[in-house]
Amino acid sequence: MTDTDAALARVRNLVDPAMRAAMDGLDNEIMRRVAGYQMGWVDADGRPTEAGGKAIRPAFTVLAAEALGAPAGRAVPAAVAVELVHNFSLLHDDVMDRDVVRRHRPTGWVVFGEGQAILAGNAMLVAAIEALQLGGNAGCLPVLLTAIQELIAGQSEDLDLEGRTGVTVDDVMTMEAGKTAALLACATAIGAVAAGADRESVELLRAFGHDVGIAFQLVDDILGITGDPSRTGKSSSSDIRANKRSAPIVAALSGTNGAAKRLGEMLANGPLVADEDVALASKLVGEAGGLDFAVEQADARLADAMARLDRLDVPPGATEALAALARYVVDRDR
């Protein structure tokens, strides 16, 4: 187990009881079951499971607070709120994107129906706000609300880009800044606010989280084309199948070689169905330079994030765990 694995386990053990208490507070039994399934705590019939997420976003929140000298417990309500917002967005996004597999099992809407999944997402969103208020972190609420608005805008832009012609890399990067980077920026900034940090530290950590979030999404985009379903827990070549306009796909379509032209012809008629077409299109993204573009941009954003941490006015070594977590989420295969 690496130091980062140990940090994730520590944060998960710290945050999990508060997370479960927030979910137990949902009034409706169906909502509790759908939410528990989404969190990986129960199966479709409500039976306890050993599954569960890594608590990456709560870890960013807690480690950000600790980097500024605050005890971990002070950031727990904020960490719970961030994770609940994350899972609210996943429940809704899976419905809109028609994704059928997440974390190696059927998505919430596939198991419980679209309506129940949407309602459970709404319930988790409300519980996130309650977690801040009940935990004495109401001062963090503006940070969370801003991120929620950005998440909604990012998902709206993502839907708008699907299958649209003339999409540029800048269009995609703007969308991904809202859809993914906004919540990681929130996770680090809200940890700083919970720690009582000054404005400059909050903004530096917000920018750090934003850069990490962009890098994280670029890696996710790569895995949406090349990822092994047994490792990622998602459908094979999911972005290609759905004809999504992710960064490597748009970068590839912007190329001038034969692979870019052939890829454009294949994607011009909507989502791909045949496995052989999906495999060919995935290969063409690489040949047209889309994957290389995403790797280079992810590395550049991670470097920018590390530069932000270097500017924080904290004792030497205070940000080591935070920096290690950033590298961990960018250098991953699932």
Image (cartoon, grey):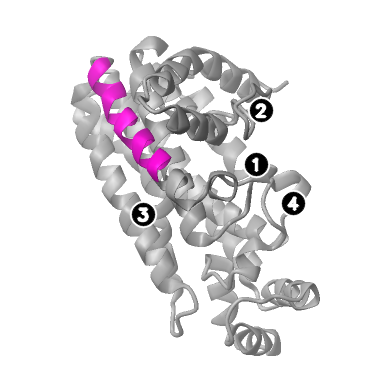
Query: Residue type at mark 1?
Result: Arg
Q: Nearer the viewer, mark 2 or mark 3?
A: 2
Q: Secondary structure at mark 2?
A: loop
Give the alpha-carbon distance from disc 2 to disc 4, as whole Å. Answer: 17 Å
Tell which of 307 and 193 is nearer to you.
Answer: 193
> Disc number at residue 154?
none
Say whether residue 329 is magenta: no
List x then y, in percent, for residue 259: 70, 85
Which residue sits furthest right? 276
Q: Earlier in the sequence, mark 2 or mark 4?
A: 2
Q: Residues within 10 Å of mark 2 (few under 14, many from 20)?
A: few
Q: Residues within 10 Å of mark 4 (few under 14, many from 20)?
A: some
Q: What secondary structure characterizes most of the magenta part?
A: helix
Q: Earlier in the sequence, mark 1 or mark 4?
A: 1
Residue 184 visible within the image: no
> Disc number at residue 103?
1
Residue under pointer 4 = 229
